[in-house]
Amino acid sequence: MRVSISLIIGSVLLGAMLIAAAVPDWFAPFDPLAFDYDALSMPPSGEHWFGTDQFGRDVLSRIIHAARVDLQIAVFCVIFPLVLGGAIGLLVGWYGGILDAVFGRLVDLVVTFPFLVLVIFFVAVLGPGLVNVYIAVTCVGWVPYAKLMRAEVMVQAQSDYVAAGKVLGYQMPRILLRHILPNAARPVLVYAVTDMALAILLGSSLGYLGLGAQPPTAEWGVLIADGKNFFTTAPWMALFPGLAIVLAGLGFSLTGDGLADLLAVKR
Amino acid sequence: MTALLEVSDLAVVFHTKRGPVHAVDGLGFSVERGEVLGIVGESGSGKSVTLRAITRLLHGAEVTGRVNWQGEDVLAMDTERLRRMRGGQIGMVFQEPMAALNPVLSIGLQITETLIAHTQLDAAGRRARALELLDLVGIAAGRTRLAQFPHEFSGGMRQRAMIAIALAANPALLLADEPTTALDVTIQDQILRLLRGLVDDLGMALVLVTHDLGVIAETCDRVAVMYAGRLCETGAVAPVFAAPRHAYTKALLGAMPGQGQDALVAIPGMAPRLDAPALGCAFAPRCAFRLPVCDTTRPALREFGPAQSSACHAAEALAS
Amino acid sequence: MNRGSWLLGRLAQIVPTFLMIGIAVFVLARLLPGDQVSAMLGERATDETIARLQAELGLDRSIFEQLLNFLVAAAQGEFGTSMSLRLPVMQVIAERLPVTLALMSIAMVLALAIALPLAFVAALNANRWPDMLIRTVFQIGLSSPVFYIGLLLLTVFAAGLRWFPVGGYGDDWGEHLYHLFLPGLTLSFSFAAVVMRNLRAGILAVLTAEYVDFARAKGLAAGVVLGRHVLRNALIATVTLVGLHVGALLGGAVITETVFAVPGVGRLMIDSILARDYPVIQALTLVLAVLVSLAFLLTDLVQMWLDPRVGR
């Protein structure tokens, strides 16, 4: 057990983001949606730390309010694939046999489709928007969770306490849920934290492409897309939301690395 | 005339998180041209570390003392001089041929790269020399063997290939670190005979590290017995085996199978702790001849006859 | 087991893989909600035009007949006509695909040029400051979205310093290289980070291997030991990773091409989605999956070349 620097820095970053997302009004100096025609495209100043956009909206306030959306993306883009993939991996790992063979072929097939391309394909058919992004990511992103869970369950199924459970005549669901799941869950959860960093990148990328969060929802990727046309004249409009993404991504991946160290999970 | 290799006051300390580990402590011995020296001791006695310290192959260890190669200080050599000595003048054979041979390079390449490093031979010359070497170590069908990879060789053949690589540049000394431990008994014997034959034919010197006194008796001219990183006793094989002057040597000989007893008799007691070196004799806690002085004073190396020295307070008691 | 038959077996595997990809794309296109035909025709569609288009697309036949027709057509490169570009889909893709392949190649070369030396520097200085610095920089690189890196490079080096064009592809190979350098660099960062991380770990593992000590004991020069004995063995694991990363690289290409207005298949994908050009989207999904499976194949071949133990 060792608390690493990664874990400390990562959790500080995440903690700050969580607080900002929970009570944005405490920190945002301005109303994120309020137009101010006297302060259009103002560079960073004492009043507007990160400047204003082409409608005079305070960039810092918009970034703080967008934290909620991006955190939501990070969590939902991971939790749904985790639940679906975890359930599939649990069943496949426990029952094995033909189910496992079919699973193997399916995984081989899914990994030949580039992740982002497949997500975009789903979003294209379902239509842009965050809900459809969650559906698309769930359909595509369950694979690594299922693989992890299957491998863990297969290890746990060989252990003594499972054998003992069978001898004691416990029902299968009880063994699965009470004994195997808690033990198998650890590496899956560590992976999930790291995966949230990727989810932030994915969500903001889709937002940037116009396939994710839809304006006027403030989302970091959308903010960058809004600001990109002013990048040479008013770089602060896209620069600062990008930094927010980098810090959030760092927060999740450092926390994930630190947790892996702490819980001695091999990756 | 100076000895081929002269080691004196050699100490190797590994600095670990739990403190220093004294793997080798005040070790001294010498090797003359054309002779076979056996270094024997239990695992952890520092014999393998000694070999690697001689060629400066240890990672993250503090090595002090003197290693003289033909009068030249090895520990002070620059990188290029050291490179030319390694492989060129001192060949090495490791314990596990499967681990020591690079799995993804052909045996031929692994021989010829040594030739490139140490000789002026052209490609054709290197190939001829490689075939000659395989023949020398008893690997038949050399032409096909050169193109093959380590996993296509048997254990004994791998060890022969490694010996061929070590011999490639005609070294004056071969250091062999338990060359037969990973092999089964019949192959062990073949490899030892091969090594002894090579020494006799090529006029090369050999240092053979082993934990097996039988190997020493069969192959070596002289022996050095190590315990806890220290030298216990050294001398010509015959007098040391006939009349050991160190209590540890005596115990080792007593534990040897096949000397009028069927079972292996283990030496009682625990292996020594290298993180807290003994003030007196390292073997004292397990010694049957222990004297009060053994716990307080480290025994000095004393000569007993022309070809035997020992560092044991009870040396006289052993003789009677 | 002989290597020749292993190779043949591996090559033969590509056939069922392609078939599975074809079936998957067909099923995906049919399973998802949303009526392709009315989406293609828009709001002006009458019952009559819908029926005619359905017949044209063979949507009035049985599902298995449709699948068979789709697979046969796909095998011949027949994907119908692009609704927005009024051109055969295959022609559109064939024009754009080389651009994306060139972009990915540049990105891969740049990534390896960045990652290989830095992985060595990091591994040889493990846990000292050069290692910490390199890992921190790459950690930040891994957390930066592709489009953001692209925008930064575009603003600084193209719009600001005017060293590079702000977009496009150019007309000959020299111009292609010039136009694709910044997008390639953009795309290379995350790939370089992944390769560096993996290769560093690989080198660290190999550095303590007995055969590396033995190579030193043979008196080989440090460069030979690192290049021949360490790198080659460390690369074996990394090659697999490179293959697995081709899909992610394609995804990154979609975004990079959008940022830099590069006329590749990634840009085509986004344009087609915005234009609801289903035949193109469907064909592209299939082509890109085929591309990835070919990359997996290539990976296995390289692995076989690097590691004589494979296939025996």
Image: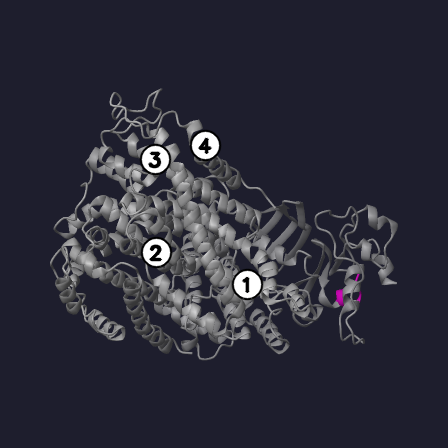
Query: For mark 3, what is the residue?
Result: A241
Residue A23 is tagged as 4
Kind of residue indicated by mark 4? Val
Tag 2 and tag 1, C-beta contact below 8 Å:
no
Q: Are marks 1 and 3 in contact (CB under 8 Å)?
A: no
Specify whether disc 3 shares its chain with disc 2.
yes
Scheme by which the image is coloured: one colour
* Sequence-first tag of 3 and 2: 2
Residue beneath disc 2: A115
Residue placed under numbered mark 1 in the picture: A153
Tell me the distance, in whole angstroms, between the alpha carbons under discs 4 and 2: 34 Å
Measured along the vertical axis of the image, is residue A230 above or below residue A143? above
Q: CA distance from mark 3 to mark 2?
A: 24 Å
- Residue C150 x, y percent position in the rendering: 28, 42
* Label whose residue precedes the other's in the sequence (4 or 2): 4
Query: From the viewer's perspective, is residue A122 above or below residue A102?
Result: above
Please say whether residue B117 is visible from this viewpoint.
no
Q: Secondary structure at mark 2?
A: helix
Report the mark closest to the observer, 3 or 4: 4
Check the residue under mark 3 and report the chain it is in: A
C160 lies above or below B311: above
